[in-house]
């Protein structure tokens, strides 16, 4: 029976890896996302019921539940050098002339690749298994970011065709954030009152340096492989064939790589991407040109910092001039006042731009933007329009600096600047502008997901006084809605049905929907998993909140103060009275065994479990796996060669159990 289960688990793993290959490498998915999720759920269920069969390279083991304490250094066996840049055709031809002179021949060809705007990464595979992922760092030494890179589904944990894989294979490539993921991430950060990332590259870099891989996993990063580093035996004799081998091994390679017989073809390819790049689902900031044959690369060698056999061609940032027709001040759900420039419409990077955020009033003053100014705009990361320069020599006479409002433009109440911050906020909790934005956020897809409750309807509901808080949504009647402008009876029924369906959303989504300052979706998930119920969270002490991994003092204070506000508690009571029942995390619902709610620390080597397997078994038993011994620890599970944690446990009088006792407790 056990053998049959083990075979079934391995069959599911291979099937999932095959679909990952079709999706990420060949871009030819054969099943829907829903069918894939069903396979994944089946595998997870089997592994949770049989933790002894869990292996580190299983598709279910991408995300570590335990945050890191920091990053260790990794020394690259082969230095990760940077590249020299060019910006025009003449500089590319000059590069080609240097290659010809050094090789003494024109018998060579090039490979031209898209220069993905992301983060260079090194992946070390031993016998086909991913063992280490490291950033470039200074080229000699990088940071070990294995736990975070494992969450990237485009990165295979196990290579395909194990019999043909070198014993040691270091794959180099680029981790990047797709445009859609970047836009969604910045939207969530703005809603949580957090500063937006300037571009997808910064977002990708920041995501790789998070200490909690669960948050990295939610960032939807992706990956393209483009070179080898340390390798026990070559994959091919040239670069293009190496990339083809990559694909057969299950490594994603950019589909738009091209070979070029000479520098003129290289230039044509580079120029052709100047416009085409705008249609990609990710950002590129140029092209990379490489000599194809490896023996010719050996002849060309490298300078102290860059290879002589490759060079990058950088695109100029596309900019446009336009006129600031007016400046509006928007009020956000947390009361933040944001200045926005209304522009004379202008074409930029393939779209018509009419508005550009000025971020905050400090930034507006730094740039010195005034109504009537001619300004230069570009898209931050080619996505978000922003003003980068004011043409002051073209400024019309009589213009005046734009002053930050002394009162809320929506409700006329007092405003104040954040202490040690840059944001100015409306201080009126009853501000109609804030209420509208809070309701939009509450009903949004990533929160309570109330279909049909759009901006226009929220405007009517708030302006007529029918909805003054979240709870009022759940008191609405079909007949009331049908009486509103442009709201037929069928449409009203759809809204009521959608509101009813939202009553059983997961707890973390409800926490997110409340719009607590500094709390976004990821931190809401951490809180939901830690407390397991809304009641436990609402009554938590500030010290307990602050002790949770990834919930710092600022977040802890914000959550604590939110639930101590009588007005907020009243609305939540009304929501619960209206039938709202946020669903507890599944892990919490399973906690009924002997170890339910216990905190367990593991030390030493176990006979039947790897470290990942034992942590999974502990969680499955309803307990928490902790990395350090403290007075809150219930048990220390000691294996062979235990470390100082065992001494600490004995010092504190904490019960120590062995592997046999643990197995008895989880039966």
Image: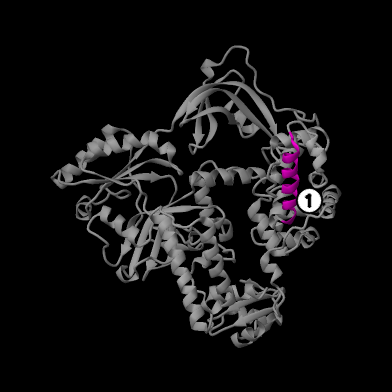
Instruction: Please provide percent x and percent y for residue 3.
Output: 48, 82
Using the rendered image of the protein, determine whether residue 651 is visible from the camera's viewpoint: yes
Does residue 13 lie above or below 99 as drawn?
below
Q: Is residue 41 left or right of residue 244?
A: right
Q: Nearest the camera: 597 or 281?
A: 281
Q: Badge 1: few (under 14), some or many (20 or more) residues near its Cα, within 10 Å?
A: some
> Horizontal and vertical percent for residue 111?
27, 47
**Residues shaded magenta:** 487-504
Q: Is residue 316 left or right of residue 444?
A: left
Residue drawn at (77%, 33%), measured in percent from left and top? 460
- Spot the residue most to the top: 397
Residue 90: quadrant of the picture: top left
Which of 580 and 439 lies nearest the eye of the viewer? 580
How many marks do you count on the picture?
A: 1
Q: Main secondary structure of the magenta part?
A: helix
The magenta stretch spans residue 502: yes
Verify whether residue 302 appears in magenta: no
Is residue 516 visible in this depiction of the protein?
no
Left or right: residue 418 compared with residue 176: right
Give the secondary structure at mark 1.
Answer: helix
**Residue farthest to the left?**
104
Q: Which residue is mark 1?
A: 562
Q: Nearer the viewer, residue 108 or 43?
A: 43
Q: Quadrant of the C terminus?
A: bottom right
């Amino acid at each position: 029976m056990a053998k049959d289960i083990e075979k079934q688990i391995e069959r599911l793993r291979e099937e999932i890896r095959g679909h990952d290959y079709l999706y990420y490498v060949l871009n030819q998915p054969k099943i829907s996302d829903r069918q894939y999720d069903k396979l994944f759920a089946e595998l997870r269920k089997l592994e949770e019921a049989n933790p002894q069969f869990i292996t580190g390279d299983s598709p279910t083991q991408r995300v570590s539940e335990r945050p890191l304490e920091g990053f260790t250094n990794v020394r690259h066996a082969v230095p990760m050098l940077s590249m020299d840049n060019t910006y025009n055709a003449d500089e590319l031809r000059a590069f080609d002339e240097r290659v010809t002179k050094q090789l003494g021949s024109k018998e060579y060809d090039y490979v031209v690749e898209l220069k993905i705007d992301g983060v260079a990464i090194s992946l070390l595979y031993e016998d086909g298994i991913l063992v280490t992922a490291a950033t470039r760092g200074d080229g000699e030494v990088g940071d070990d970011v294995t736990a975070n890179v494992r969450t990237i589904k485009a990165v295979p944990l196990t290579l395909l065709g194990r019999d043909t894989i070198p014993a040691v294979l270091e794959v180099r490539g680029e981790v990047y954030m797709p445009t859609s993921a970047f836009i969604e991430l910045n939207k969530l950060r703005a809603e949580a009152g957090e500063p937006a990332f300037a571009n997808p590259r910064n977002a990708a870099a920041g995501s790789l340096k998070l200490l909690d891989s669960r948050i990295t996993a939610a960032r939807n990063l992706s990956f393209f492989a483009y070179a080898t580093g340390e390798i026990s035996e070559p994959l091919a004799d040239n670069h293009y064939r190496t990339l083809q081998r990559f694909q057969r091994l299950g490594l994603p390679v950019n589909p738009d790589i091209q070979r070029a017989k000479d520098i003129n073809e290289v230039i044509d390819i580079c120029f052709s991407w100047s416009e085409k790049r705008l249609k990609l689902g990710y950002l590129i900031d140029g092209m990379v040109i490489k000599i194809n044959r490896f023996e010719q690369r050996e002849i060309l060698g490298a300078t102290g910092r860059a290879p002589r056999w490759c060079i990058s061609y950088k695109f100029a940032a596309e900019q446009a001039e336009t006129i600031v027709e007016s400046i509006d001040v928007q009020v956000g759900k947390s009361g933040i006042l944001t200045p926005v420039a209304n522009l004379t419409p202008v074409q930029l990077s393939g779209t018509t731009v009419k508005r550009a955020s000025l971020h905050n009033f400090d930034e507006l003053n730094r740039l010195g933007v005034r109504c009537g100014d001619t300004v230069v705009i570009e898209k931050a990361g080619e996505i978000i329009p922003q003003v980068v320069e004011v043409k002051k020599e073209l400024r019309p006479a009589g213009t005046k600096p734009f002053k930050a409002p002394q009162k809320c433009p929506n409700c006329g109440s007092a405003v104040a600047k954040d202490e040690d911050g840059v944001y100015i906020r409306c201080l009126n909790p009853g501000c109609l502008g804030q209420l509208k934005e809070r309701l939009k956020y509450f009903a949004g897809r990533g929160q309570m997901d109330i279909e049909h409750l759009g901006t226009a309807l929220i405007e009517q509901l708030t302006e007529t006084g029918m909805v003054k808080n979240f709870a009022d949504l759940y008191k609405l009647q079909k007949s009331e809605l049908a009486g509103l402008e442009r709201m037929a009876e069928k449409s009203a029924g759809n809204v009521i049905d959608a509101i009813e369906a939202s009553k059983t959303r997961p707890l973390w989504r409800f926490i997110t929907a409340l719009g607590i300052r500094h709390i976004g979706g990821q931190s809401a998930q951490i809180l939901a998993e830690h407390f397991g119920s809304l009641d436990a969270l609402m009554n938590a002490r500030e010290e307990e909140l602050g002790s949770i991994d990834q919930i710092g003092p600022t977040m802890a204070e914000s959550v604590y103060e939110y639930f101590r506000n009588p007005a907020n508690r009243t609305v939540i009571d009304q929501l619960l009275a209206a039938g709202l029942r946020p669903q507890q995390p599944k892990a919490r619902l399973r906690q009924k065994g002997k170890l339910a709610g216990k905190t367990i620390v593991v030390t030493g080597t176990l006979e039947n479990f790897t470290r990942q397997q034992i942590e999974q078994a502990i969680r499955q038993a309803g307990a928490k796996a902790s990395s350090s011994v403290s007075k809150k620890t219930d048990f220390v599970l000691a294996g062979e060669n235990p470390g100082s944690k065992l001494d600490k446990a004995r010092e504190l009088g904490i019960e120590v159990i062995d592997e046999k006792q643990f197995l008895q407790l989880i039966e």
